[in-house]
Image (cartoon, rainbow, N blue to C red):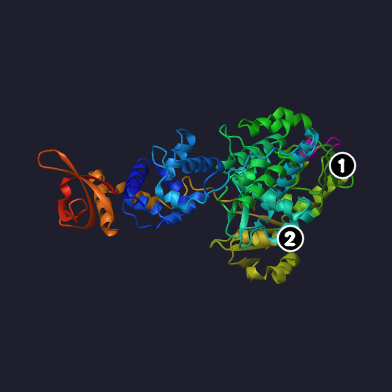
């Protein structure tokens, strides 16, 4: 490695913004605990062959081709976006000349011709719209199920087999592969977030559930596009032809798998078809613009805001029910079929769950009467009244010490609770007319609700209160943790009062360590400069020692008189 390369790179690094420095450190997989004291240390490390090779693996195809041409032709990388990118990433100097360390490790490759775009698989706009509708509906079902019972993650971060099976059996997805891809899409869009060993729905996910089908599809399509790796994006912030994705990072051995995953997500979300072509409403999205909402809406079945309530305790939606209405209806009825015309069934259990979540008999009647095209059938009205009358037989609230207190006017039911083996973890014991548990009132309430008891939550004064069981993912920190904060602060804090002298001292130290032949420019007392080529052998006491190649004598030069140093011939 040439000392001058390190000096040039160090100067470049010192002028970069923190975000660019973080990118370089992350691409080279530098440890945040690196003991560098200044930018010269950083430059020397980045020009180490191992770290150069890591950086090469992160090069996009277009950057790699520009660097390949410069190395093959012995010419600088031409001015432009590629030179700028390669400069700030530590591959070339400001003039576009590749560093010697890059030349030494460059693996070389034959730039591939752009593959021809595969013919479309014949996916019509109508069929693509059906796929978009199906994907949006499936993901909404997954989030609804996740709100009720969070999905579990295995050690690798993938969806657990049990929950994959649960999603298939519920009808939310057709198979495990679809479940995995929709979970990945939801994470990319910020609708779910990992929390310990679970996936939790985020506040953004709850808002997404309440939006319309077209808005749902478009918001996730934008998120998927905007999170594509940089090499897949075109200059207008769209994406390059899908046929070119496979070799977008020619030196990254893990890239083909990642590229295939990205393509599958876009296909799953109906942003491209099997041939990589975007449907008509997404063509502007592919070019960096926005999806055509009106064009997609025209191909989707219209949403409805009314249902048919039947005497057999079912509700039939004649089309896709408006999302906000569907969300509320599903708190009180179990959906039996998932299609453009869905069927929901009311049961004692589903109505009890709605009452437990805060509904009342009156609120249920008002909502259903407004929703129904056929009025409120007598059997359903009776079931609501019966469930409401039974609901609240058991009351759970805090006692003066904050413990769970379980009461009921039905002594037989209270005794049944006391001996129920499913409730043993609560450690219930009789205290006068009530059962007491050292558990929190909320814990006792949900355990009783899960055991199908007609339970209501009350405050310390006995007034009913609604509990929301949905546990959402914590809001992300306003500023994500920066693993390189300490390292960057140390680099920024390095003394720069006499940077030229600092670079010179480092170059002289390196020359002495390697006994290099260097050409020294020395400023004489009369103000003139003299060039001396010597083999550097020692540095100390403010003096450089070495053998003058031309005169074949030992020389000692004051460091204060040395103007510059460069590799000797």
Rendered location of residue 472, percent (x, y): 60, 50
- Tell me which corner region of the image, top left, top right, bottom left or bottom right, holds residue 412: bottom right
User: In 3D space, how far apart are the residues under numbered discs 2 and 1 (Cα atoms)?
Assistant: 26 Å
Choose between 466 and 234: the one closer to the eye: 234
Rendered location of residue 525, percent (x, y): 10, 42
Kindly tell me whether residue 327 is visible in this rendering.
no
Residue 66 vs 165, above or below: the answer is above
Query: In this figure, what is the number of numbered marks?
Result: 2
- Tags 2 and 1 touching, CB below 8 Å: no
Residue 520 vs 421, above or below: the answer is above
What numbered label is drawn on residue 377? 1
What numbered label is drawn on residue 429? none
Magenta residue span:
367-375
Rendered location of residue 465, percent (x, y): 63, 50
Residue that extends furthest to the left in the rendered view of this protein = 526
Choose between 49 and 495: the one closer to the eye: 49
Q: Residue at x 62, y 30 (%)?
A: 289
Structural crowding at the residue carrying mark 1, measured as other residues with C-alpha within 10 Å and reported as few (<14), some (14–19) or many (≥20): some
What numbered label is drawn on residue 453? 2
Choose between 241 and 154: the one closer to the eye: 241
Label 2: state its secondary structure: loop
Choose between 20 and 462: the one closer to the eye: 20
Rendered location of residue 201, percent (x, y): 63, 49
Q: Residue at x 78, y 41 (%)?
A: 365
Label 1: state its secondary structure: loop
Q: Residue at x 73, y 49 (%)?
A: 354
- Tell me which corner region of the image, top left, top right, bottom left or bottom right, holds residue 390: bottom right
Q: Is residue 88 left or right of residue 490?
A: right
Q: Is residue 22 left or right of residue 433?
A: left
* Magenta stretch contains residue 311: no
Decide which of tag 2 and tag 1 comes sooner along the chain: 1
């Amino acid at each position: 490695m040439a000392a001058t390369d390190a000096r040039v790179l160090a100067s470049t690094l010192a002028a970069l913004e923190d975000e660019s420095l973080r990118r370089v450190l992350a691409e080279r997989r530098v440890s945040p605990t690196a003991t560098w004291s200044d930018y010269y240390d950083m430059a020397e490390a980045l020009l180490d062959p191992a770290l150069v090779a890591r950086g090469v693996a992160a090069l996009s195809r277009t950057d790699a081709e520009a660097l390949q041409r410069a190395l093959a032709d012995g010419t600088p990388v031409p001015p432009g976006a590629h030179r700028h990118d390669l400069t700030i990433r530590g591959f070339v100097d400001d003039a576009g000349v590749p560093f010697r360390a890059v030349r030494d490790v460059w693996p070389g490759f034959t730039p591939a011709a752009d593959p021809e775009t595969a013919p479309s698989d014949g996916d019509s706009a109508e069929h693509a719209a059906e796929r978009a509708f199906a994907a949006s509906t499936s993901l909404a079902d997954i989030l609804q199920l996740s709100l009720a019972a969070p999905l579990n993650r295995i050690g690798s971060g993938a969806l657990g087999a049990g929950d994959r099976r649960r999603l298939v059996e519920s009808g939310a997805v057709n198979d495990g592969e679809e479940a995995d891809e929709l979970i990945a899409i939801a994470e990319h869009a910020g609708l779910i977030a990992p929390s310990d060993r679970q996936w939790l729905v985020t506040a953004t996910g709850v808002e997404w559930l309440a939006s319309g089908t077209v808005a749902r599809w478009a918001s996730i399509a934008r998120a998927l596009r905007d999170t594509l790796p940089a090499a897949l994006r075109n200059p207008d912030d769209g994406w390059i032809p899908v046929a070119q994705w496979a070799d977008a990072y020619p030196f990254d051995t893990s890239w083909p798998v990642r590229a295939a995953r990205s393509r599958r997500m876009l296909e799953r979300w109906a942003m491209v078809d099997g041939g990589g072509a975007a449907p008509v409403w997404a063509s502007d999205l592919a070019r960096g613009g926005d999806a055509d909402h009106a064009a997609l809406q025209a191909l989707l079945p219209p949403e409805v805001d009314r249902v048919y309530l039947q005497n057999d305790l079912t509700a039939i939606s004649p089309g896709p029910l408006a999302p906000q209405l569907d969300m509320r209806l599903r708190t009180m009825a179990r959906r039996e079929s998932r299609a453009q015309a869905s069927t929901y069934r009311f049961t004692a259990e589903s109505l009890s769950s709605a009452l437990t979540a805060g509904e009342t008999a009156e609120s249920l009647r008002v909502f259903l009467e407004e929703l129904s095209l056929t009025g409120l059938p007598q059997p359903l009205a009776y079931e609501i009244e019966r469930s409401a009358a039974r609901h609240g037989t058991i009351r759970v609230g805090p006692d003066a010490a904050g413990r769970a207190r379980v009461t009921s006017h039905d002594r037989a039911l209270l005794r049944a609770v006391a001996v129920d083996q499913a409730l043993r973890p609560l450690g219930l014991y009789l205290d006068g007319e009530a059962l007491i548990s050292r558990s929190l009132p909320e814990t006792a309430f949900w355990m009783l609700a899960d055991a199908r008891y007609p339970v209501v939550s009350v405050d310390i004064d006995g007034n009913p209160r609604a509990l929301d069981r949905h546990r959402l993912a914590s809001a992300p920190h306003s500023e994500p943790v920066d693993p390189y904060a300490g390292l960057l602060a140390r680099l920024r804090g390095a003394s720069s009062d006499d940077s030229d002298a600092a670079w010179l001292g480092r170059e002289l130290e390196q020359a002495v360590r390697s006994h290099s032949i260097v050409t020294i420019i020395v400023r004489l007392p009369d103000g003139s400069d003299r060039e001396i080529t010597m083999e550097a052998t020692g540095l100390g006491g403010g003096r450089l020692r070495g053998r003058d190649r031309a005169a074949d004598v030992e020389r000692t030069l004051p460091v204060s008189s040395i103007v510059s140093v460069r590799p000797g011939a």
